[in-house]
């Protein structure tokens, strides 16, 4: 299960279940994928196919919704760990 946290500008923001517990978010669009750490700071972890312009837009969205993404991540991981 990969819960989707947000869709914006064609980007899909989600996490992959049963992955590491460090707070992060994956972003996909078509065949491209990137991963950002959300803590301790927002930081690009990996990028497969997105242009620098797209990464800049993704970063803006993550900065805007970062606290919400952190909350959603924590809630989802908490449910997984407690199962």
Image (cartoon, rainbow, N blue to C red):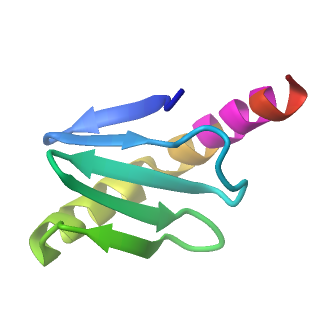
Find out whether residue 24 is within the magenta segment: no
Vertical order, 18 against 31 (above or below): above
Residue range in magenta is 72-79
Q: In the rendered view, does 38 fall on the left or right side of 82?
A: left
Q: Quadrant of the N terminus?
A: top right
Q: In the rendered view, does 40 fall on the left or right side of 59?
A: right
How far across and how far down the image is residue 19, in percent? 64, 49
- Image-quadrant location for residue 79: top right
How far across and how far down the image is residue 54, in percent? 15, 64
Of 64 and 40, the residue lying toward us: 40
Q: In the rendered view, does 44 fall on the left or right side of 23?
A: left
Vertical order, 22 against 52 (above or below): above
- Total marks shown come to 0
Of 2 and 65, the residue lying toward us: 2
- Image-quadrant location for residue 41: bottom right
Of 77 and 60, the residue lying toward us: 77
Q: Residue at x 42, y 30 (%)?
A: 4
Q: Residue furthest right?
A: 82
Vertical order, 68 against 2 (above or below): below
Find out whether residue 73 is within the magenta segment: yes
Q: Quadrant of the C terminus?
A: top right
How far across and how far down the image is residue 33, in percent? 29, 57
Vertical order, 13 against 78 (above or below): below
Q: Residue at x 19, y 62 (%)?
A: 57
Q: Residue furthest top?
A: 83
Q: In the rendered view, does 2 fall on the left or right side of 78?
A: left
The overriding secondary structure of the stretch rendered in magenta is helix
Q: Residue at x 34, y 51 (%)?
A: 27
């Amino acid at each position: 299960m990969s819960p989707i946290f947000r869709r914006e500008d064609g980007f899909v923001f989600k996490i992959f279940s049963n992955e590491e517990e460090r707070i992060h978010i994956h972003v996909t669009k078509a065949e491209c994928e990137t991963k950002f750490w959300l803590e301790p700071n927002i930081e690009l972890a990996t990028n497969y196919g997105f242009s620098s312009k797209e990464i800049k837009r993704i970063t803006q969205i993550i900065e805007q919704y970062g606290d919400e993404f952190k909350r959603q991540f924590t809630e989802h991981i908490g449910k997984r760990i407690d199962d």
